[in-house]
Image (cartoon, rainbow, N blue to C red):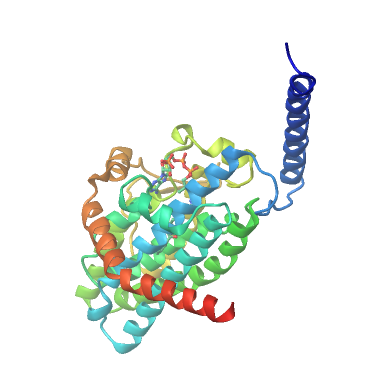
Amino acid sequence: MATAAEHQTARSAPDQAAADAARTAAQQSAFDAAVAADERIEPRDWMPDAYRASLVRQIAQHAHSEIIGMQPEANWITRAPSLRRKAILMAKVQDEAGHGLYLYSAAETLGTSRDELLDKLHSGRQKYSSIFNYPTLTWADVGAIGWLVDGAAITNQVPLCRCSYGPYARAMVRVCKEESFHQRQGYESLLALSRGTEAQHAMAQDAVDRWWWPSLMMFGPPDDESSHSEQSMTWKIKRHSNDELRQRFVDICVPQAESLGLTLPDPDLVWNEERGQHDFGAIDWTEFWAVLKGNGPCNEQRITQRKSAHDEGAWVREAAAAFAAKHGEAKA
Ligand code: BYC
């Protein structure tokens, strides 16, 4: 026979479940209302598990792109053609490390540690941008990356300054300011080459020929193949679709290429009077998916180098942890 206490428990369990369900429904409504009103969701606010997971996925991929993105450009630091160019390039590469730091910190506010994310990057369980799996063959590639890759990044990231998740949106404000400087230095460097000798002009054109299409792929798959866009736009993580941002980028680049005296490698690129936008040629999505699967020209090299940099930096992390422990003891 059940005791009085057992009766009490049996009675209260369904009540408890109903109370929990009502609380979750109220939290969900408050979250939906905040998103609809363009308010920011902050780390201590209630949020749906799927919203948190999608943010961690996107922020992690973004953070990984920043630190892997240091490699192709760092390749040219020792061979920059002047002290001025070297100083600018070093500052830019250092900025990218800083962007990684802001982004890993934003992911930490969602309860995911940097160690965990790096582990997923190193074991291939998380992605980084496809663009960084292409090689930097000449000095002009540094200019082309600044102009096109940072230009694409700005086009994609300015709307992220209005992302519904506060820490990510605030990190993006500073990142975008720095990316603007990066884009201009790339443009200026390419302009110098384009107006230089015939060989320098040809080098600039060759770099643009190689980086144009991969830059368009940075915006992600076409809308009808983008698995996350619709939900991310409902949550106001993303404000525009992949195709919308890609189109915006093409329209921005065409007049800039003209000013640079360089040609964009697309015979189908033409102004469409009716749409008020440029039409452009078909993107090779087979190449994009192959790069994502790990079969780009530099995938293996990038991850190998990243892992060895991580291993070689172990002593720094140990020293920092020992210092923090000692500092903590002294305070106590
Ligand atoms: N590369 O449903 P979708 C930079 C993945 S670097 C690799 O459209 P979403 C910089 C996507 O993750 C630029 N993967 O996804 C640094 C998803 O796979 P999972 C980095 C890509 O998230 C140094 C699947 O394809 N910027 O700034 O709605 C120097 C389906 O895609 C790519 C950012 O990361 C790609 N290009 O939209 C210079 C910005 N595209 O996760 C510059 C923040 C798609 O299901 N991120 N995938 O395994 C975003 O805005 C969005 O995540 C994306 C993709 C637009 C990239």
Visible residue check, residue 3: yes
Residue 267 picture location, percent across and down: 32, 48
Residue 90 picture location, percent across and down: 36, 79
Residue 161 picture location, percent across and down: 61, 59
Question: Looking at the image, which residue sits at the far top?
Answer: 1
Name the foreground residue: 9 vs 226.
9
At x 53%, y 77%, the residue is: 329
Name the foreground residue: 63 vs 105.
105
Visible residue check, residue 152: no
Q: Looking at the picture, does residue 234 appear above or below residue 147?
A: above
For the N terminus, the image quarter is top right
Is residue 105 shown left or right of residue 183?
right
At x 31%, y 41%, the residue is: 284
Snapshot quadrant of residue 279: top left
Q: How many marks?
A: 0
Residue 145 picture location, percent across and down: 35, 65
Snapshot quadrant of residue 42: bottom right
For the C terminus, the image quarter is bottom right
Snapshot quadrant of residue 292: top left
